[in-house]
Amino acid sequence: MATVEKLGTRDERLPKAAMGVLSLLMLISFLTRAVLLGMAGHGNVPFSAWPRVFLLGAWFDLLVAMATVSPLLLLAALALDWWRLSRFYAVMRFLTLWGICLGVLFAAVAEVTFW
């Protein structure tokens, strides 16, 4: 029974980490959109259009975030128990999640830079 409990605690880490990455992606996207709207100014984008811009942007960002994290979650669902408990899997999971975060930050900086 101890093995089952250990598997349960290890398996719960990835979905929690994926939710954290999804949240971080949504936050960075929201901040990027706010900065870009501020840079565009009130003359180009009236304040009355801002709620629509943020809602449509949030919808698009949610879809992109789910598509970004879904392969990692699918891999976790299909991985064998012995592989999921290995150190290699833990390191690869960590590097993949950090890679996603760095990619999102890179995209945000690029959007602001080349706006």
Image: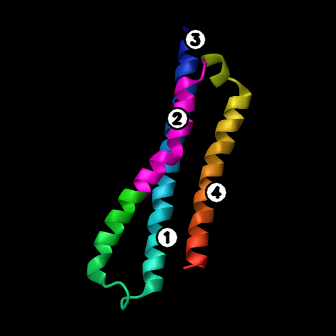
**Among the 4 quarters of the image, the one containing residue 92:** top right
Mark 1 is on which residue type? Thr
Left-right relation of 37 to 93: left
User: Label 4: few (<14), some or many (≥20) within 10 Å?
Assistant: few
For the residue carrying disc 1, how many other residues have a C-alpha within 10 Å: few (<14), some (14-19), or many (20+)?
A: some
Under mark 2, the amino acid is: Leu
Q: What element carries label 2?
A: helix
| Stretch of the chain drawn in magenta | 61-80
Residue that badge 3 annotates: 2
Q: Quadrant of the C terminus?
A: bottom right
**Residue shown at the point (52%, 32%) measured from the top left:** 74
Give the label, 3 or 4, closer to the camera.
4
Question: Is 6 in front, or is 20?
Answer: 20
**Residue drawn at 58 percent across, 26 percent down:** 10
Give the residue number, with chain letter if any, for mark 1. Answer: 32
Whether residue 19 is situated above or below residue 109 in the rendered picture: above
**Is 30 rendered above or below residue 39?**
above
Disc 4 target residue: 102
Q: Circle 2 sits on which residue?
A: 73
State which mark lies toward you, 2 or 3: 2
Q: Tell me if residue 13 is in the magenta stretch.
A: no
Asked which quadrant contains residue 90, the reply is top right
